[in-house]
Image (cartoon, grey):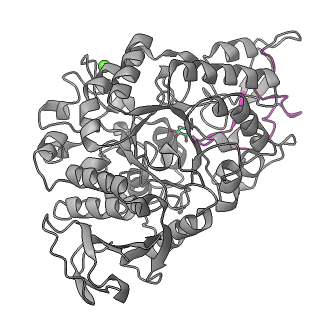
């Protein structure tokens, strides 16, 4: 396989609303990002993926776009964007845009027109419209991802439109060649501006089956999954997109593909697929529980390892992995997979970083993860800002279906707002994010956890990430090596070997508080320790059995 820059890159995700506020209106913005580029340069990342910055009424924080070729006023202007792109490029950092084309906002001009209907309306068929059932009810029982029916009745057209997300996010009709033309033209416009790629929002959902029967009841509504995920024409559409846009530029593309299996991933992003460079899979972060996705249970380590190992081996030589613990839709990694108690937070954040960054694929860091930022201590439903959490609380709790006491630990464990609290820059008011009133609460632990403190501490989580990133640049085995899991039955230790042309890595990570013992395999006798979260000195003894402290991690390197 030909090596590409995006295989060797480390990506940093910015959620602009929560990153840095430059004008003190409480909302992060583009000039704010510009003034923090040197911070990212110091971290050593190569690519920024920016969550949507387009014009939007913000029903879903920018994932509901009303104009793809304008910048959200709160975030700045197109000129600011151009400055950002230029300033990033000047530092050798590329910019990948979020592309949300499964749906638009209901305030997008296309939808405003579409809803007027009429025989000759060129936009009439831009969205997915269906007649009501005879009794006037929705065409089928599908539920939307944010609660309620996936159908909304429009008084004007006397029809229902499909929205797999909120009713302010109507799904585009990709069957319509004019929709595809419009999307591809818009993408080309951004490519001509000089952007470096796209992260494609729920791209696995753009093709729907022609028949739309009721789905199997899941929670309160029918499941649209079998009819809308990896639908009949999704690969045709992506091949067309690749041919008409992507293949004409030097881009990095990553598809958000809920429900993807390794087999399906090879169809989207196989070496010979002519669709995308890689996809995000979600098996390791999906732990369905009593209340759908709302769940405070931890995935057993054996299961987590099995999932990640399967992706490592099944894509090897066939497709490219994307590696992540968290993003703007997930709780904070250290709270979910590590231990965010003060005595273990730093150690377990470094352990998780080791575990992920030594895997094969392109690693993604979500803003604040490099500081070990934690989940937010929610006190009441009034703390929520996210449409998904707000609706879920209503649907499950306020409705009387589940008592608050039972539901509360589950929703707070995985609410998307955990990831969306402001970036913690320093120990001044509002963590240095804004002098105004932040749009969402700041995590009170910013006095201990912040970038300023970590930049001057050589032993900080920040510097640990910096080191992992630089190791990836020095050792091709980290990027391209094969993978082999050790101790698959252990519920405490995640250990694996990487190997490439006589170069070997041993990665050992303890996921538990208690002390453990680990036997370093024979072939690593005399190996060098590349990195460890046990202090700065690397006087690791590599002979036979070693003691592992709480959340300890180390990496041994050997060249034959
Ligand atoms: C994706 C985004 C999420 C958004 C949804 C609808 O899953 O990551 O934030 O709410 O799509 O656009
Ligand atoms: Ca602002």
Q: Quadrant of residue 316?
A: bottom right
Q: Nearer the viewer, residue 380 or 467?
A: 467
**Location of the N terminus (image quadrant):** bottom right
Residue placed at 48% from the left, 24% from the top? 58
Query: Looking at the image, which is closer to me, 137 or 217?
Result: 217
Is 130 a magenta residue?
Answer: yes
Q: Position of residue 459 (x, y in %)?
A: 14, 56
Q: Main secondary structure of the magenta part?
A: loop
Give the x, y percent position of residue 226: 76, 52
Where does the magenta region start and end?
A: 123-152
Count of number-bearing discs: 0
Judge from the rendering whether residue 199 lies leftward or rightward of residue 175; answer left or right: left
Q: Classify 113 as above or below 148.
A: above
Residue 139 percent across, percent down from the top left: 81, 36
Q: Is residue 532 left or right of residue 129?
A: left
Name the quadrant of the C terminus.
bottom left
Residue 14 lies, with reference to residue 4, above or below; the image says above
Q: Quadrant of residue 75?
A: top left
Query: Ligand 2 falls in which quarter?
Result: top left
On screen, residue 454 versus residue 54, left or right, reads left
Q: Is residue 435 magenta?
A: no
Q: Is residue 505 left or right of residue 231?
A: left
User: Residue drawn 71% across and 48% down?
Assistant: 273
Question: Residue 79 lies in what quarter of the image?
Answer: top left
The answer, for residue 303, to whether it is visible in the render is yes
């Amino acid at each position: 396989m030909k090596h590409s820059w995006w295989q060797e890159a480390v990506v940093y995700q910015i959620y602009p609303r929560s990153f840095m506020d430059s004008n003190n209106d409480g909302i992060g913005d583009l000039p704010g990002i510009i003034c923090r580029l040197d911070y990212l340069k110091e971290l050593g990342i190569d690519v920024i993926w920016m969550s949507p910055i387009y014009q939007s009424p913000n029903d879903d924080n920018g994932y509901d776009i009303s104009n793809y070729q304008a910048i959200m006023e709160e975030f700045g202007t197109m000129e600011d964007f151009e400055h950002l792109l230029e300033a990033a490029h000047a530092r050798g950092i590329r910019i990948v845009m979020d592309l949300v084309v499964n749906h638009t906002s209901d305030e997008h001009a296309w939808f405003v027109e579409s809803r007027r209907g009429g025989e000759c309306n060129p936009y009439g068929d831009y969205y997915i419209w269906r007649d009501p059932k005879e009794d006037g009810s929705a065409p089928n029982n599908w539920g939307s991802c944010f609660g309620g029916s996936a159908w909304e009745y429009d008084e004007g057209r006397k029809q229902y439109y499909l929205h797999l997300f909120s009713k302010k996010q109507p799904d585009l009709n990709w069957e319509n060649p004019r929709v595809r033309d419009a999307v591809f033209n818009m993408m080309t416009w951004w490519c001509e501006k000089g952007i470096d790629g796209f992260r494609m929002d729920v791209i696995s959902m753009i093709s729907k089956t022609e028949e739309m029967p009721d789905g199997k009841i899941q929670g309160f509504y029918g499941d649209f999954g079998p009819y809308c995920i990896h639908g009949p024409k999704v690969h045709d559409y992506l091949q067309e997109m690749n041919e008409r846009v992507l293949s004409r530029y030097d881009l990095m593309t990553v598809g958000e593909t809920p429900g993807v299996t390794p087999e399906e991933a090879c169809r989207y992003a196989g070496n010979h697929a002519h669709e995308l460079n890689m996809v995000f899979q979600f098996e390791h972060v999906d732990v369905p529980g009593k209340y759908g996705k709302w769940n405070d249970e931890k995935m057993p380590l054996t299961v987590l390892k099995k999932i990640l190992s399967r992706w490592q081996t099944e894509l090897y030589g066939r497709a490219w992995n994307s590696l992540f613990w968290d993003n703007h839709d997930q709780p904070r990694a250290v709270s979910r997979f590590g231990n965010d108690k003060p005595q273990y937070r730093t150690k377990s954040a470094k352990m998780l970083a080791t575990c992920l960054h030594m895997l094969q694929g392109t690693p993604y860091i979500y803003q604040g993860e490099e500081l070990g930022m934690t989940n937010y201590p929610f006190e009441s439903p009034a703390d929520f800002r996210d449409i998904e959490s707000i609706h879920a609380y209503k649907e499950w709790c306020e409705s009387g279906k589940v008592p608050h006491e039972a539901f509360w630990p589950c929703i707070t464990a995985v609410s998307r707002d955990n990831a969306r609290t402001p970036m913690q820059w320093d120990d001044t008011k509002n963590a240095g994010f804004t002098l105004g009133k932040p749009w969402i609460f700041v995590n009170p632990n910013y006095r201990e956890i912040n970038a300023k403190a970590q930049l001057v501490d050589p032993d900080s989580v920040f510097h640990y990430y910096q080191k992992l990133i630089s190791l990836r640049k020095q050792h091709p085995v980290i990027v391209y090596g094969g993978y082999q899991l050790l101790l698959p039955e252990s519920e405490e230790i995640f250990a694996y070997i990487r190997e490439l042309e006589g170069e070997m890595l041993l990665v050992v990570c303890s996921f538990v508080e208690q002390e453990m013992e680990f036997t370093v395999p024979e072939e690593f006798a005399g190996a060098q320790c590349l990195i460890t979260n046990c202090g700065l000195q690397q006087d690791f003894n590599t002979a036979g059995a070693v003691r592992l402290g709480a959340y300890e991690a180390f990496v041994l390197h050997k060249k034959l």
